[in-house]
Amino acid sequence: MIRKAAVAGRFYPSRPADLTSALQGFVHPVDNPKKAIGIIAPHAGYMYSGHVAGAVYSAVNLPQRNIVLCPNHTGRGVPLSIMRSGEWETPLGNMRIDEELCTALMAADPDL
């Protein structure tokens, strides 16, 4: 299953070249980025929060494996869920879901 990029073209550019340019404007390498075990970064449209998210991501070394947590904006459905296989579509290419990590998370929390 592929989770479509639902808001591409509205909250961030849908064309790869435009998205790359926007990201380059938000992310600026810093001397001595920090090792972090977790960060909180805004996820609103880039026009609202891109500069803040860019500052957060610029300040840390991200590991190879990352877990993205997000709220249930609609309030419908179960309180917790996980997409355990497939890919997330982005204008820069699809991102494969780490099935091994999802299986471990589901074993650790039966509510997922």
Image (cartoon, grey):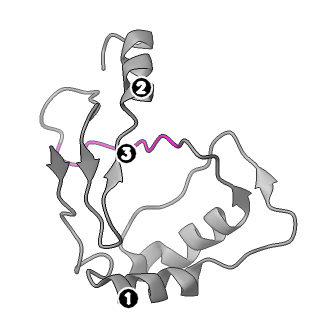
For the residue carrying disc 2, how many other residues have a C-alpha within 10 Å: few (<14), some (14-19), or many (20+)? few
Residue 65 rendering spot, x and y as whole percentages:
55, 41
For the residue marked with disc 3, what is the amino acid? Answer: Cys
- Mark positioned earlier in the residue sequence (1 or 3): 1
Residue 68 inside the magenta-drawn segment: yes
- Mark positioned earlier in the residue sequence (3 or 2): 3
User: Would you identify the image quadrant in which residue 6 lies?
Assistant: bottom left
Q: Are marks 3 and 2 in contact (CB under 8 Å)?
A: no
Question: Which residue bears the numbered disc 3?
Answer: 70
Question: Which residue bears the numbered disc 1?
Answer: 17
Residue 45 rendering spot, x and y as whole percentages:
35, 73
Residue at image x 39%, y 11%?
107
- Mark positioned earlier in the residue sequence (2 or 1): 1
For the residue marked with disc 1, what is the amino acid? Answer: Ala
Residue at image x 35%, y 41%?
97
Quadrant of the snapshot with the C terminus: top left
Q: Main secondary structure of the magenta part?
A: loop
In the image, which is nearer the foreground, mark 1 or mark 3? 1
Give whichever of 51, 30 is nearer the camera: 30
